[in-house]
Amino acid sequence: MGLTKSKNTSFRRKQLLPYLLVSPYLIFVSVFVIFPVLFCFFLTFHKWNIIAPMRFIGTENYARLIHDRLFWKAIGNTLKFLSLHIPLQLVISLFLAQLLNQKIRAASFFRASFFMPVIVSGVVITILWQQLYGFDNGMINRLLAVVGISKKGWLVNPDLAIYSIAIMATWKNLGLYVILFLVGLQTVPEQYYEAAKMEGANSWQRFFHITLPMINPTIFMVVVLSTIGGFSLFIEPYIMTSGGPLNQTLSAVLYIYKQAFQYYNMGYSATLGFFYAIMIMTVVILQKRFIEKEG
Amino acid sequence: MLYAALSIAAVSFIYPFIWMIGAALAPMHEISGMVIWPVHPGWGNFKYMIAKIPILHSLMNSLLLASITTSLVLITGSTVGYALAKMRFRGRQTIFYVIVFTMSLPFQITLIPNYITMVNLHLVDTFLALILPFAVSAFAVLMFRQAFQGLPQALIDAARMDGCSEWRIIFTVLWPNIKPVIVTVAILTFIGSWNEVLWPLIVIRNENLMTMPQLVTLFAVGGRADSQLGVKIAAAVLLALPVMIAFLFFQKHFISSMASTGLKD
Protein backbone atom coordinates (compact mmCIF):
# COMPACT_ATOMS: atom_id res chain seq x y z
CA MET A 1 0.00 0.00 0.00
CA GLY A 2 1.92 2.98 -1.29
CA LEU A 3 0.65 5.65 1.01
CA THR A 4 4.12 6.66 2.15
CA LYS A 5 3.88 10.27 1.02
CA SER A 6 0.92 11.02 3.23
CA LYS A 7 2.14 12.78 6.35
CA ASN A 8 -1.03 13.99 7.97
CA THR A 9 -1.68 13.24 11.60
CA SER A 10 -4.47 10.77 11.02
CA PHE A 11 -2.05 8.61 9.08
CA ARG A 12 0.50 8.80 11.88
CA ARG A 13 -2.15 7.79 14.34
CA LYS A 14 -3.10 4.91 12.11
CA GLN A 15 0.49 3.72 12.12
CA LEU A 16 0.83 4.02 15.86
CA LEU A 17 -2.52 2.51 16.64
CA PRO A 18 -1.52 -1.18 16.44
CA TYR A 19 1.35 -0.55 18.83
CA LEU A 20 -0.97 1.25 21.19
CA LEU A 21 -3.34 -1.71 21.11
CA VAL A 22 -0.64 -4.29 21.79
CA SER A 23 1.11 -2.14 24.38
CA PRO A 24 -0.61 -3.75 27.38
CA TYR A 25 0.89 -7.05 26.37
CA LEU A 26 4.30 -5.59 25.61
CA ILE A 27 4.48 -3.89 28.99
CA PHE A 28 3.19 -6.97 30.74
CA VAL A 29 5.55 -9.40 29.06
CA SER A 30 8.53 -7.13 29.69
CA VAL A 31 7.80 -6.57 33.36
CA PHE A 32 6.44 -9.97 34.37
CA VAL A 33 8.09 -12.42 31.97
CA ILE A 34 11.21 -11.24 30.15
CA PHE A 35 12.72 -9.16 32.93
CA PRO A 36 12.06 -11.85 35.59
CA VAL A 37 13.67 -14.56 33.45
CA LEU A 38 16.80 -12.44 32.98
CA PHE A 39 16.78 -11.34 36.60
CA CYS A 40 16.35 -14.95 37.70
CA PHE A 41 19.45 -15.90 35.73
CA PHE A 42 21.31 -12.97 37.28
CA LEU A 43 20.21 -14.02 40.78
CA THR A 44 21.60 -17.51 40.29
CA PHE A 45 25.11 -16.04 40.65
CA HIS A 46 24.31 -14.11 43.82
CA LYS A 47 23.68 -14.60 47.48
CA TRP A 48 20.89 -12.39 48.75
CA ASN A 49 18.48 -12.33 51.66
CA ILE A 50 16.61 -9.24 50.32
CA ILE A 51 17.70 -7.06 53.27
CA ALA A 52 21.50 -7.10 53.13
CA PRO A 53 23.22 -6.09 49.85
CA MET A 54 23.50 -8.71 47.14
CA ARG A 55 26.82 -10.56 46.94
CA PHE A 56 28.31 -12.12 43.80
CA ILE A 57 29.30 -15.73 44.49
CA GLY A 58 29.99 -17.13 41.04
CA THR A 59 28.60 -20.59 40.48
CA GLU A 60 28.33 -21.46 44.17
CA ASN A 61 24.54 -21.76 43.97
CA TYR A 62 24.84 -24.31 41.19
CA ALA A 63 27.41 -26.34 43.12
CA ARG A 64 25.09 -26.27 46.12
CA LEU A 65 22.16 -27.41 43.98
CA ILE A 66 24.07 -30.40 42.67
CA HIS A 67 24.81 -31.56 46.22
CA ASP A 68 21.45 -30.57 47.71
CA ARG A 69 19.99 -33.90 48.80
CA LEU A 70 16.65 -32.33 49.73
CA PHE A 71 16.18 -30.83 46.28
CA TRP A 72 16.86 -34.13 44.55
CA LYS A 73 14.59 -35.83 47.00
CA ALA A 74 11.87 -33.36 46.03
CA ILE A 75 12.45 -34.16 42.35
CA GLY A 76 12.36 -37.86 43.17
CA ASN A 77 9.08 -37.37 45.03
CA THR A 78 7.64 -35.61 42.00
CA LEU A 79 8.70 -38.50 39.76
CA LYS A 80 7.12 -40.99 42.17
CA PHE A 81 3.99 -38.88 42.10
CA LEU A 82 3.94 -38.87 38.29
CA SER A 83 4.67 -42.60 38.06
CA LEU A 84 1.29 -43.29 39.64
CA HIS A 85 -0.62 -40.17 38.62
CA ILE A 86 -0.13 -40.37 34.83
CA PRO A 87 -1.01 -44.05 34.25
CA LEU A 88 -3.94 -43.83 36.66
CA GLN A 89 -5.19 -40.66 35.02
CA LEU A 90 -4.90 -42.09 31.50
CA VAL A 91 -6.53 -45.43 32.22
CA ILE A 92 -9.45 -44.23 34.34
CA SER A 93 -10.30 -41.14 32.30
CA LEU A 94 -10.11 -43.01 29.00
CA PHE A 95 -12.27 -45.78 30.47
CA LEU A 96 -14.92 -43.35 31.72
CA ALA A 97 -14.82 -41.41 28.45
CA GLN A 98 -15.40 -44.66 26.53
CA LEU A 99 -18.44 -45.38 28.69
CA LEU A 100 -19.80 -41.88 28.21
CA ASN A 101 -19.19 -41.99 24.47
CA GLN A 102 -22.04 -44.45 24.01
CA LYS A 103 -25.62 -43.42 23.78
CA ILE A 104 -26.53 -43.35 27.43
CA ARG A 105 -29.10 -41.59 29.53
CA ALA A 106 -28.14 -38.93 32.03
CA ALA A 107 -24.77 -38.47 30.32
CA SER A 108 -24.68 -34.82 31.35
CA PHE A 109 -25.31 -35.77 34.98
CA PHE A 110 -22.35 -38.15 34.98
CA ARG A 111 -20.13 -35.67 33.19
CA ALA A 112 -21.03 -32.97 35.69
CA SER A 113 -20.37 -35.18 38.70
CA PHE A 114 -16.92 -36.14 37.40
CA PHE A 115 -16.22 -32.51 36.67
CA MET A 116 -17.10 -31.02 40.05
CA PRO A 117 -13.64 -31.44 41.67
CA VAL A 118 -11.94 -29.86 38.64
CA ILE A 119 -13.36 -26.42 39.30
CA VAL A 120 -13.23 -26.50 43.10
CA SER A 121 -10.12 -25.03 44.72
CA GLY A 122 -7.27 -27.42 45.49
CA VAL A 123 -7.44 -26.06 49.04
CA VAL A 124 -10.93 -27.51 49.47
CA ILE A 125 -9.99 -30.83 47.89
CA THR A 126 -6.96 -31.13 50.14
CA ILE A 127 -8.83 -30.36 53.36
CA LEU A 128 -11.53 -32.83 52.32
CA TRP A 129 -9.10 -35.64 51.48
CA GLN A 130 -7.16 -35.06 54.65
CA GLN A 131 -10.31 -36.26 56.41
CA LEU A 132 -10.98 -39.09 53.95
CA TYR A 133 -7.43 -40.32 54.55
CA GLY A 134 -7.77 -40.15 58.34
CA PHE A 135 -6.31 -43.19 60.08
CA ASP A 136 -9.03 -44.04 62.60
CA ASN A 137 -12.10 -42.29 61.31
CA GLY A 138 -11.29 -41.68 57.67
CA MET A 139 -13.88 -42.81 55.17
CA ILE A 140 -11.36 -44.72 53.09
CA ASN A 141 -10.01 -46.83 55.94
CA ARG A 142 -13.58 -47.55 57.05
CA LEU A 143 -14.54 -48.67 53.56
CA LEU A 144 -11.47 -50.90 53.44
CA ALA A 145 -12.44 -52.37 56.80
CA VAL A 146 -15.79 -53.39 55.33
CA VAL A 147 -14.03 -55.52 52.71
CA GLY A 148 -11.59 -56.80 55.31
CA ILE A 149 -8.47 -54.79 54.48
CA SER A 150 -6.53 -53.41 57.42
CA LYS A 151 -6.11 -49.68 58.07
CA LYS A 152 -3.50 -47.83 56.07
CA GLY A 153 -1.58 -44.79 57.26
CA TRP A 154 -2.28 -42.91 54.04
CA LEU A 155 -0.60 -39.69 55.04
CA VAL A 156 1.60 -40.84 57.92
CA ASN A 157 3.32 -43.80 56.30
CA PRO A 158 6.44 -42.36 54.61
CA ASP A 159 6.33 -44.94 51.82
CA LEU A 160 2.70 -44.27 51.04
CA ALA A 161 2.12 -40.54 51.52
CA ILE A 162 3.22 -39.27 48.09
CA TYR A 163 1.11 -41.92 46.37
CA SER A 164 -1.87 -40.92 48.48
CA ILE A 165 -1.43 -37.38 47.21
CA ALA A 166 -1.17 -38.74 43.65
CA ILE A 167 -4.49 -40.56 44.04
CA MET A 168 -6.12 -37.42 45.35
CA ALA A 169 -4.74 -35.35 42.47
CA THR A 170 -6.06 -37.93 40.00
CA TRP A 171 -9.49 -37.69 41.58
CA LYS A 172 -9.38 -33.92 41.33
CA ASN A 173 -8.37 -33.69 37.66
CA LEU A 174 -10.07 -36.75 36.24
CA GLY A 175 -13.18 -34.91 35.03
CA LEU A 176 -11.18 -32.59 32.81
CA TYR A 177 -9.40 -35.48 31.12
CA VAL A 178 -12.64 -37.39 30.66
CA ILE A 179 -13.93 -34.41 28.70
CA LEU A 180 -10.73 -34.10 26.67
CA PHE A 181 -10.88 -37.79 25.78
CA LEU A 182 -14.57 -37.50 24.91
CA VAL A 183 -13.70 -34.73 22.45
CA GLY A 184 -10.90 -36.90 21.09
CA LEU A 185 -13.08 -39.99 20.75
CA GLN A 186 -15.68 -38.08 18.82
CA THR A 187 -13.12 -37.24 16.12
CA VAL A 188 -12.71 -40.94 15.26
CA PRO A 189 -14.81 -41.56 12.14
CA GLU A 190 -17.57 -44.13 12.66
CA GLN A 191 -16.76 -45.83 9.33
CA TYR A 192 -13.41 -47.01 10.69
CA TYR A 193 -15.15 -49.02 13.37
CA GLU A 194 -17.69 -50.37 10.93
CA ALA A 195 -15.01 -51.43 8.47
CA ALA A 196 -13.11 -53.17 11.26
CA LYS A 197 -16.27 -54.92 12.41
CA MET A 198 -16.77 -56.26 8.87
CA GLU A 199 -13.24 -57.61 9.01
CA GLY A 200 -14.20 -59.41 12.18
CA ALA A 201 -12.19 -57.35 14.66
CA ASN A 202 -13.43 -57.68 18.24
CA SER A 203 -13.89 -54.69 20.50
CA TRP A 204 -10.43 -54.99 22.09
CA GLN A 205 -8.78 -55.10 18.67
CA ARG A 206 -10.82 -52.11 17.56
CA PHE A 207 -9.76 -50.24 20.68
CA PHE A 208 -6.04 -50.95 20.28
CA HIS A 209 -5.81 -50.60 16.50
CA ILE A 210 -8.23 -47.78 15.80
CA THR A 211 -9.11 -45.82 18.91
CA LEU A 212 -5.68 -45.57 20.52
CA PRO A 213 -3.76 -44.46 17.41
CA MET A 214 -6.50 -41.99 16.48
CA ILE A 215 -6.57 -40.27 19.85
CA ASN A 216 -2.80 -40.05 20.12
CA PRO A 217 -2.86 -36.21 20.23
CA THR A 218 -5.26 -36.32 23.18
CA ILE A 219 -3.05 -38.80 25.00
CA PHE A 220 -0.11 -36.49 24.50
CA MET A 221 -2.10 -33.56 25.81
CA VAL A 222 -3.22 -35.46 28.90
CA VAL A 223 0.31 -36.67 29.61
CA VAL A 224 1.76 -33.18 29.23
CA LEU A 225 -0.96 -31.49 31.28
CA SER A 226 -0.62 -34.03 34.10
CA THR A 227 3.15 -33.74 34.00
CA ILE A 228 3.05 -29.96 34.27
CA GLY A 229 0.45 -30.29 37.01
CA GLY A 230 2.64 -32.75 38.88
CA PHE A 231 5.69 -30.52 38.61
CA SER A 232 3.60 -27.65 40.01
CA LEU A 233 2.50 -29.59 43.08
CA PHE A 234 2.45 -27.21 46.02
CA ILE A 235 -0.72 -26.58 47.98
CA GLU A 236 -1.52 -30.27 48.53
CA PRO A 237 1.65 -31.11 50.49
CA TYR A 238 1.68 -27.59 52.00
CA ILE A 239 -1.67 -28.20 53.68
CA MET A 240 -1.69 -31.96 54.14
CA THR A 241 1.78 -32.89 55.28
CA SER A 242 3.95 -29.78 55.05
CA GLY A 243 6.34 -32.00 53.09
CA GLY A 244 6.49 -34.75 55.68
CA PRO A 245 6.69 -37.46 56.85
CA LEU A 246 10.50 -37.52 56.55
CA ASN A 247 10.33 -35.12 53.57
CA GLN A 248 8.69 -37.86 51.52
CA THR A 249 6.04 -35.48 50.16
CA LEU A 250 8.28 -32.45 49.80
CA SER A 251 7.59 -31.12 46.30
CA ALA A 252 10.07 -29.01 44.37
CA VAL A 253 7.79 -25.96 44.38
CA LEU A 254 7.27 -26.31 48.12
CA TYR A 255 11.05 -26.51 48.57
CA ILE A 256 11.62 -23.44 46.39
CA TYR A 257 8.98 -21.63 48.44
CA LYS A 258 10.60 -22.66 51.71
CA GLN A 259 14.08 -21.63 50.55
CA ALA A 260 12.76 -18.19 49.61
CA PHE A 261 10.24 -17.42 52.32
CA GLN A 262 11.40 -19.39 55.32
CA TYR A 263 15.19 -19.15 54.92
CA TYR A 264 15.29 -16.04 52.71
CA ASN A 265 17.84 -17.53 50.32
CA MET A 266 16.61 -15.57 47.31
CA GLY A 267 19.63 -16.32 45.14
CA TYR A 268 19.56 -20.02 45.84
CA SER A 269 15.79 -20.23 45.51
CA ALA A 270 16.01 -18.50 42.12
CA THR A 271 18.67 -21.02 41.09
CA LEU A 272 16.34 -23.86 42.00
CA GLY A 273 13.49 -22.24 40.08
CA PHE A 274 15.66 -21.61 37.03
CA PHE A 275 17.02 -25.13 36.94
CA TYR A 276 13.63 -26.66 37.62
CA ALA A 277 11.90 -24.69 34.85
CA ILE A 278 14.49 -25.82 32.31
CA MET A 279 14.02 -29.37 33.50
CA ILE A 280 10.25 -29.18 33.06
CA MET A 281 10.57 -27.80 29.53
CA THR A 282 13.05 -30.54 28.64
CA VAL A 283 10.75 -33.26 29.97
CA VAL A 284 7.78 -31.89 28.01
CA ILE A 285 9.80 -31.73 24.79
CA LEU A 286 11.05 -35.30 25.31
CA GLN A 287 7.50 -36.52 25.94
CA LYS A 288 6.37 -34.87 22.73
CA ARG A 289 9.17 -36.54 20.75
CA PHE A 290 8.48 -39.91 22.30
CA ILE A 291 4.73 -39.87 21.72
CA GLU A 292 5.08 -38.60 18.15
CA LYS A 293 7.43 -41.46 17.40
CA GLU A 294 5.07 -44.02 18.90
CA GLY A 295 2.09 -42.68 16.98
CA MET B 1 -23.18 -53.04 33.69
CA LEU B 2 -22.42 -49.79 31.95
CA TYR B 3 -24.63 -47.85 34.31
CA ALA B 4 -23.28 -49.69 37.33
CA ALA B 5 -19.73 -48.62 36.50
CA LEU B 6 -20.75 -45.04 35.82
CA SER B 7 -22.83 -44.86 38.97
CA ILE B 8 -20.04 -46.16 41.18
CA ALA B 9 -17.77 -43.53 39.67
CA ALA B 10 -20.36 -40.79 40.13
CA VAL B 11 -20.93 -41.74 43.76
CA SER B 12 -17.21 -41.64 44.45
CA PHE B 13 -17.18 -38.08 43.18
CA ILE B 14 -20.35 -36.78 44.77
CA TYR B 15 -20.41 -38.57 48.13
CA PRO B 16 -17.30 -36.86 49.55
CA PHE B 17 -18.75 -33.43 48.79
CA ILE B 18 -22.05 -34.22 50.46
CA TRP B 19 -20.19 -35.69 53.42
CA MET B 20 -18.17 -32.47 53.61
CA ILE B 21 -21.29 -30.30 53.78
CA GLY B 22 -22.77 -32.60 56.42
CA ALA B 23 -19.57 -32.49 58.47
CA ALA B 24 -19.50 -28.69 58.31
CA LEU B 25 -22.94 -28.62 59.91
CA ALA B 26 -22.24 -31.32 62.45
CA PRO B 27 -21.32 -30.69 66.08
CA MET B 28 -17.81 -31.79 67.01
CA HIS B 29 -18.62 -35.22 68.44
CA GLU B 30 -20.77 -36.22 65.49
CA ILE B 31 -18.14 -35.97 62.77
CA SER B 32 -17.04 -39.45 61.93
CA GLY B 33 -16.15 -41.53 58.93
CA MET B 34 -19.23 -42.35 56.99
CA VAL B 35 -22.33 -40.70 58.34
CA ILE B 36 -23.58 -38.38 55.68
CA TRP B 37 -25.90 -36.14 57.61
CA PRO B 38 -25.56 -35.11 61.27
CA VAL B 39 -28.34 -35.87 63.74
CA HIS B 40 -28.17 -32.37 65.20
CA PRO B 41 -27.13 -30.06 62.38
CA GLY B 42 -26.34 -26.48 63.27
CA TRP B 43 -24.38 -23.39 62.29
CA GLY B 44 -21.96 -23.70 65.21
CA ASN B 45 -18.87 -24.32 63.08
CA PHE B 46 -19.62 -21.40 60.81
CA LYS B 47 -20.22 -19.05 63.74
CA TYR B 48 -16.96 -20.11 65.35
CA MET B 49 -15.08 -19.53 62.11
CA ILE B 50 -16.60 -16.12 61.48
CA ALA B 51 -15.62 -15.10 64.99
CA LYS B 52 -12.04 -16.31 64.52
CA ILE B 53 -11.06 -15.10 61.06
CA PRO B 54 -12.31 -12.38 58.65
CA ILE B 55 -13.72 -15.02 56.33
CA LEU B 56 -16.59 -12.94 54.94
CA HIS B 57 -14.20 -10.10 54.30
CA SER B 58 -11.92 -12.46 52.37
CA LEU B 59 -14.93 -13.66 50.40
CA MET B 60 -15.54 -10.09 49.27
CA ASN B 61 -11.82 -9.66 48.50
CA SER B 62 -11.81 -12.76 46.33
CA LEU B 63 -14.98 -11.74 44.49
CA LEU B 64 -13.63 -8.26 43.87
CA LEU B 65 -10.22 -9.45 42.72
CA ALA B 66 -11.60 -12.14 40.45
CA SER B 67 -14.00 -9.61 38.87
CA ILE B 68 -11.33 -6.97 38.31
CA THR B 69 -8.83 -9.47 36.95
CA THR B 70 -11.41 -10.99 34.62
CA SER B 71 -12.43 -7.56 33.27
CA LEU B 72 -8.82 -6.59 32.66
CA VAL B 73 -8.00 -9.87 30.93
CA LEU B 74 -11.05 -9.50 28.67
CA ILE B 75 -10.13 -5.92 27.73
CA THR B 76 -6.40 -6.44 27.20
CA GLY B 77 -6.96 -9.77 25.50
CA SER B 78 -9.38 -8.15 23.04
CA THR B 79 -7.26 -5.16 22.10
CA VAL B 80 -4.07 -7.17 21.70
CA GLY B 81 -5.85 -10.02 19.95
CA TYR B 82 -7.57 -7.57 17.62
CA ALA B 83 -4.34 -5.88 16.61
CA LEU B 84 -2.68 -9.23 15.97
CA ALA B 85 -5.62 -10.55 13.97
CA LYS B 86 -6.74 -7.59 11.93
CA MET B 87 -3.89 -5.10 11.60
CA ARG B 88 -0.66 -5.20 9.70
CA PHE B 89 2.36 -3.72 11.41
CA ARG B 90 6.02 -4.46 11.85
CA GLY B 91 6.78 -6.92 14.61
CA ARG B 92 3.37 -8.52 14.53
CA GLN B 93 4.70 -12.00 13.82
CA THR B 94 7.45 -11.59 16.43
CA ILE B 95 4.90 -10.70 19.09
CA PHE B 96 2.90 -13.75 18.18
CA TYR B 97 5.93 -16.00 18.61
CA VAL B 98 6.79 -14.36 21.92
CA ILE B 99 3.27 -15.09 23.17
CA VAL B 100 3.43 -18.72 22.15
CA PHE B 101 6.86 -19.13 23.68
CA THR B 102 6.07 -17.43 26.98
CA MET B 103 2.99 -19.60 27.37
CA SER B 104 5.16 -22.68 27.60
CA LEU B 105 7.44 -21.09 30.18
CA PRO B 106 6.94 -22.70 33.60
CA PHE B 107 5.92 -20.25 36.32
CA GLN B 108 8.62 -21.53 38.67
CA ILE B 109 11.20 -19.43 36.83
CA THR B 110 9.41 -16.11 37.34
CA LEU B 111 8.08 -16.73 40.84
CA ILE B 112 10.96 -15.37 42.93
CA PRO B 113 11.89 -12.46 40.59
CA ASN B 114 8.25 -11.34 40.42
CA TYR B 115 8.08 -11.30 44.20
CA ILE B 116 11.21 -9.11 44.23
CA THR B 117 9.60 -6.80 41.66
CA MET B 118 6.63 -6.44 44.00
CA VAL B 119 8.96 -5.60 46.86
CA ASN B 120 10.76 -3.00 44.77
CA LEU B 121 7.53 -1.42 43.57
CA HIS B 122 6.30 -1.35 47.19
CA LEU B 123 3.29 -3.38 46.19
CA VAL B 124 3.58 -6.13 48.79
CA ASP B 125 0.37 -6.16 50.84
CA THR B 126 -1.68 -4.32 48.23
CA PHE B 127 -4.39 -5.48 45.86
CA LEU B 128 -2.28 -4.34 42.92
CA ALA B 129 0.18 -7.12 43.71
CA LEU B 130 -2.65 -9.59 43.20
CA ILE B 131 -3.99 -7.91 40.06
CA LEU B 132 -1.07 -6.72 37.93
CA PRO B 133 0.68 -10.07 37.33
CA PHE B 134 -2.64 -11.49 36.11
CA ALA B 135 -3.97 -8.47 34.20
CA VAL B 136 -2.88 -9.80 30.82
CA SER B 137 -3.20 -13.40 29.78
CA ALA B 138 -1.36 -14.86 26.81
CA PHE B 139 -4.04 -17.52 26.55
CA ALA B 140 -6.78 -14.88 26.33
CA VAL B 141 -4.84 -12.98 23.65
CA LEU B 142 -4.56 -16.11 21.52
CA MET B 143 -8.24 -16.97 22.01
CA PHE B 144 -9.33 -13.47 20.96
CA ARG B 145 -6.88 -13.38 18.08
CA GLN B 146 -8.31 -16.58 16.71
CA ALA B 147 -11.91 -15.42 17.22
CA PHE B 148 -11.28 -12.08 15.47
CA GLN B 149 -9.52 -13.80 12.59
CA GLY B 150 -12.73 -15.70 11.91
CA LEU B 151 -14.76 -12.51 11.51
CA PRO B 152 -15.12 -10.90 8.05
CA GLN B 153 -13.07 -7.78 7.34
CA ALA B 154 -16.22 -6.20 5.85
CA LEU B 155 -17.67 -5.87 9.34
CA ILE B 156 -14.75 -3.72 10.41
CA ASP B 157 -14.59 -1.70 7.20
CA ALA B 158 -18.29 -0.86 7.42
CA ALA B 159 -17.89 0.31 11.00
CA ARG B 160 -14.87 2.45 10.03
CA MET B 161 -16.91 4.08 7.27
CA ASP B 162 -19.46 4.99 9.90
CA GLY B 163 -16.67 6.69 11.79
CA CYS B 164 -16.34 4.23 14.66
CA SER B 165 -13.14 4.35 16.66
CA GLU B 166 -11.15 1.12 16.88
CA TRP B 167 -12.13 0.91 20.52
CA ARG B 168 -15.81 0.97 19.60
CA ILE B 169 -15.26 -1.47 16.75
CA ILE B 170 -13.77 -4.00 19.14
CA PHE B 171 -16.24 -3.71 21.97
CA THR B 172 -19.54 -2.82 20.32
CA VAL B 173 -19.25 -4.19 16.78
CA LEU B 174 -17.08 -7.30 17.14
CA TRP B 175 -17.77 -8.44 20.70
CA PRO B 176 -21.41 -9.42 20.09
CA ASN B 177 -20.14 -11.83 17.41
CA ILE B 178 -17.76 -13.75 19.63
CA LYS B 179 -19.80 -14.29 22.78
CA PRO B 180 -18.74 -17.95 23.29
CA VAL B 181 -15.09 -16.93 23.37
CA ILE B 182 -15.78 -14.13 25.83
CA VAL B 183 -17.65 -16.56 28.09
CA THR B 184 -14.82 -19.09 27.89
CA VAL B 185 -12.11 -16.57 28.71
CA ALA B 186 -14.21 -15.05 31.48
CA ILE B 187 -14.94 -18.37 33.17
CA LEU B 188 -11.36 -19.59 32.98
CA THR B 189 -9.94 -16.33 34.26
CA PHE B 190 -12.45 -16.02 37.05
CA ILE B 191 -11.94 -19.60 38.25
CA GLY B 192 -8.18 -19.27 37.91
CA SER B 193 -8.15 -16.09 39.94
CA TRP B 194 -10.56 -17.47 42.53
CA ASN B 195 -8.48 -20.60 43.07
CA GLU B 196 -5.01 -19.04 42.95
CA VAL B 197 -3.29 -19.54 46.28
CA LEU B 198 0.51 -19.70 45.89
CA TRP B 199 0.91 -16.08 44.75
CA PRO B 200 -1.32 -14.58 47.47
CA LEU B 201 0.61 -16.60 50.07
CA ILE B 202 3.75 -14.88 48.82
CA VAL B 203 2.68 -11.24 48.48
CA ILE B 204 -0.06 -10.78 51.10
CA ARG B 205 0.50 -10.89 54.86
CA ASN B 206 -2.19 -8.49 56.00
CA GLU B 207 -5.16 -10.58 57.02
CA ASN B 208 -7.66 -7.99 55.80
CA LEU B 209 -6.31 -8.18 52.26
CA MET B 210 -6.17 -11.94 52.06
CA THR B 211 -8.07 -13.90 49.45
CA MET B 212 -10.36 -16.64 50.59
CA PRO B 213 -8.24 -19.66 49.55
CA GLN B 214 -5.25 -18.08 51.25
CA LEU B 215 -7.09 -17.37 54.49
CA VAL B 216 -8.62 -20.85 54.54
CA THR B 217 -5.20 -22.41 53.88
CA LEU B 218 -3.54 -20.50 56.71
CA PHE B 219 -6.47 -21.29 58.96
CA ALA B 220 -6.21 -25.00 58.14
CA VAL B 221 -2.46 -25.31 58.64
CA GLY B 222 -2.12 -22.81 61.46
CA GLY B 223 -3.36 -23.51 64.96
CA ARG B 224 -6.34 -21.22 64.85
CA ALA B 225 -8.94 -23.82 64.02
CA ASP B 226 -8.00 -25.15 67.48
CA SER B 227 -7.87 -28.57 65.88
CA GLN B 228 -11.62 -28.45 65.51
CA LEU B 229 -12.27 -30.53 62.47
CA GLY B 230 -15.75 -29.18 61.78
CA VAL B 231 -14.55 -25.59 61.68
CA LYS B 232 -11.83 -26.43 59.18
CA ILE B 233 -14.31 -28.22 56.99
CA ALA B 234 -16.81 -25.38 57.30
CA ALA B 235 -14.14 -23.03 55.95
CA ALA B 236 -13.56 -25.37 53.02
CA VAL B 237 -17.29 -25.55 52.30
CA LEU B 238 -17.61 -21.78 52.27
CA LEU B 239 -14.69 -21.61 49.84
CA ALA B 240 -16.19 -24.25 47.56
CA LEU B 241 -19.79 -23.09 47.61
CA PRO B 242 -19.71 -20.06 45.27
CA VAL B 243 -17.94 -22.02 42.54
CA MET B 244 -20.15 -25.06 43.01
CA ILE B 245 -23.33 -23.01 42.76
CA ALA B 246 -22.06 -21.23 39.66
CA PHE B 247 -21.17 -24.61 38.20
CA LEU B 248 -24.64 -26.03 38.80
CA PHE B 249 -26.17 -23.14 36.85
CA PHE B 250 -23.66 -22.81 34.01
CA GLN B 251 -22.46 -26.40 33.83
CA LYS B 252 -22.25 -26.60 30.04
CA HIS B 253 -20.26 -23.38 29.74
CA PHE B 254 -17.86 -24.47 32.46
CA ILE B 255 -17.16 -27.81 30.87
CA SER B 256 -16.68 -26.54 27.33
CA SER B 257 -14.49 -23.69 28.60
CA MET B 258 -12.23 -25.95 30.58
CA ALA B 259 -12.01 -28.39 27.69
CA SER B 260 -10.68 -25.60 25.48
CA THR B 261 -7.67 -25.07 27.78
CA GLY B 262 -6.29 -28.33 26.52
CA LEU B 263 -6.99 -27.53 22.91
CA LYS B 264 -4.87 -24.46 22.60
CA ASP B 265 -2.28 -25.92 20.29
Image: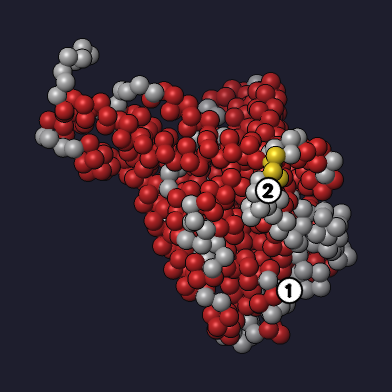
The percent position of residue B177, horizontal first and vertical second, equals: 28, 40
The answer as to whether the residues below labels 2 and 1 share one chain is no
- Residue A89, compared with residue A23, is above or below; it is below
Number of marks: 2
Q: Quadrant of the C terminus of chain A?
A: top right
| Left or right of B142 in this view: A183 | right
**Most foreground residue, B177 or A228:** A228
* Residue at screen point 58% across, 35% down: A38
**Most foreground residue, A112 or B199:** B199
Local secondary structure at mark 2: loop
Q: Nearer the viewer, mark 2 or mark 1?
A: 2
The percent position of residue B106, horizontal first and vertical second, equals: 61, 39
C-alpha distance separating marks 2 and 1: 48 Å
* Residue at screen point 57% across, 49% down: B116
Residue extending farthest to the left is: B162
Residue extending farthest to the bottom is: B40
Picture colour scheme: secondary structure
* Residue at screen point 47% across, 48% down: B134
- Residue B198, compared with residue B29, is above or below; it is above
Label of residue B33 in the image: 1
Local secondary structure at mark 1: loop
The percent position of residue A27, horizontal first and vertical second, equals: 42, 39
Q: Amino acid at mark 1?
A: Gly
Q: Quadrant of the N terminus of chain A?
A: top left
Q: Chain of mark 1?
A: B
* Residue at screen point 21% across, 26% down: A12
Tell me if mark 2 has few (under 14), some (14-19) or many (20+) residues whose alpha carbon lies within 10 angstroms of its own: many
- Residue A25, compared with residue B240, is above or below; it is above
Q: Chain of mark 2?
A: A
Visible residue check, residue A207: no
Label of residue A48 in the image: 2
